[in-house]
Every structure is written in structure tokens, then in C-alpha cells.
Image (cartoon, rainbow, N blue to C red):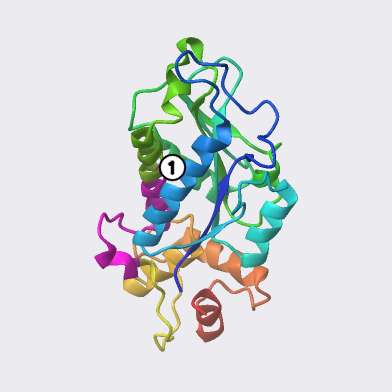
Amino acid sequence: MAYLIALDDGHGLGPKPTLGKRTPNISGVGVIYENQFNRAVVNYLDTELKRCGFRTILVAPTDVDTPLSTRIATANRAKADAYISCHYNAGGGAGVETFYHTGSSRGRRLATCIHNQVTKGTPQKNRGLKSGNHLWVIRKTNMPATLIEFGFMDDPGLVEAKRMIDPAFQKECAVETAKGICEYFGVSYSTSSSSASSTSMPSSYPGSLIRKGSRGEYVKMIQRALGGLSVDGIFGPKTQNAVKVFQRKNGLSVDGIVGPLTWNKLFP
């Protein structure tokens, strides 16, 4: 089964746009609402990820400003493998920054993979990775989560603000985010749907225990399924610890060894 990614376009447009989440009145353009950008990026990102073989779930599928508790519950109930929240910043600054939970090594790695890709695009100030422990979508989700602020809607000169309605920039942000997600899960980013099966999971147990010291493609499959690991095909201490965490979370015997029961939980 392919990885499931929860996609969150921050705030909303209906029945009224989220209060305060908009640009100043831009000459020749007017007011741009944050969710106009967020929703466009999520729509592009949804397409990018599906083409690469991921499954997705939109936690705010309408224009309504869906409550944060509903968004989080939707992702948790679906047991998503990652939570991606797309936003545009405010406060008079400029640049891109990415938030994660400081208590989650997998969350930090997810944020790092995405942030490194996003900062390769349109030249912007790199504001770095930041603690998102105060953010509900970071703090309350059961999976690695990250929130990306792709720019400022009230930056000096309103250069970044104007980009919010530029389809090329919207798609660029989505492509860069998709590449970061692919990197995190050890999946090749593809511009063609022909490789969409690359995130599919095997269904049958290989027949022998996979444990510390094991090497090969089966180890890579396990590392991809666990997430947050380097997909190098080497079952080392980090992979063993990740297996133990997974076993504990799923009520299995905690021995760090992938036998039939653990395999079937990893690849239902």
C-alpha cells in the first residue's frame, strides 16, 4: 500500500475569508487572501504526489475554514504517514521558513527535506527551520508533520505578496514540496506517471527474519515504510530502533526484528 500524505491548505475563504489572512490592497491587483495561495499549492501538490504513487487526503476539502481539530482528527483517523500544511506568512518580513516538532526526529527530517528543496527555487531569504511546538497541526498530529511558510503576504515592496497569485510560483512551491516528500520517503520524484508504482508496498513476507545486520532491498522497503530513515538497505541501530518504536506503537512484541507479524503490520 502506498504512503498516505495529509494535505492542509491553511485557513479558508468561506463563508468569509479567515480574518486578517490577506495582503494589503495592492495597486492594480487588490487584496489577495492567503487561502487563495494555499489552496492552489495544495491542489498542485495533490497532483504531484499522486503521480509519484502516493495516496493523499485533503483535510480541508472545501473553501470553508475547517477547524484545526477537524483537520487533525481527519489525518489521525486515516493514519496518514505525513502531514503537510501550506501557508503564507505575515508580519512585515520576507523569506521562507519551515516548522516542525522539536521532539520528533522524523518531523525534523521531513521539514529538512522539504525546506532544502523549497529554498532551491525562486531566490528568497532562507529563514531556516523553526520550532512549531506551539502549532496545533504540529503538536496534535500522530505522524511527522511540517508547516511551510512560502513567503510573506506583507513583505516590504510586496514582491512576495504578488507572487501569491502567480500560477508558476504556486506550482514551483508544490513541485519543490513534492520533491522533499519523495526524498524523505526514499521515493524517486517523477514527472511521469509510469513510475507511480515506486511507492507501492509488497504484500508477502519474504520468508526469513530481517534484523540488525541484514542488507538488501527488503531492508530498503522496511526503511521506506518506517519513514525518517536513510534508505540505504543496511539494517543498523537506527533501523532497529525505528522497528522497536513501530512494534511498541502497534502492540507487537518489541524485539527490533521484522518477522511475519511486524511485516504484515508494515505492509497490510
Q: For this rendering, which residue is in front, 83 or 260?
A: 83
Residue 108 at x, y percent in the picture:
53, 43
Identify the residue at image location x=46%, y=20%. Answer: 29
**Residue sitting farthest toward the bottom:** 207
Question: Label 1 crowding class (10 Å Cα cut-off): few <14, some 14-19, many 20+?
Answer: many
Residue span colored magenta: 177-198
Residue 42 seen by the camera: yes
Residue 213 visible to the viewer: no
Task: Give the main secondary structure of the magenta stretch.
Answer: helix
- Foreground of the two, 157 or 97: 157
Q: In the displayed structure, would residue 90 be above or below residue 249? A: above
Q: Residue at x 34, y 27 (%)?
A: 122
Task: Name the foreground residue: 87 vs 60.
Answer: 60
At numbered mark 1, what does the secondary structure look like: helix, strand or loop?
helix
Q: Quadrant of residue 244?
A: bottom right
Measured as percent of width and height from the top left, residue 66 is found at 69, 48
Is 130 situated left or right of 165 in this image?
right
Total labels: the figure holds 1
Residue 190 counted in the magenta span: yes
Residue 112, position as x, y percentages in the image = 46, 40
Q: Position of residue 12 (x, y in %)?
A: 63, 40
Q: Which residue is mark 1?
A: 114
Q: Is residue 213 above or below residue 76?
A: below
Residue 36 in the magenta stretch? The answer is: no
- Looking at the rendered structure, the kind of residue marked 1 is Ile
Horizontal relation, residue 114 to residue 249: left or right? left
In depth, the one of 169 and 69 nearer the eye is 169
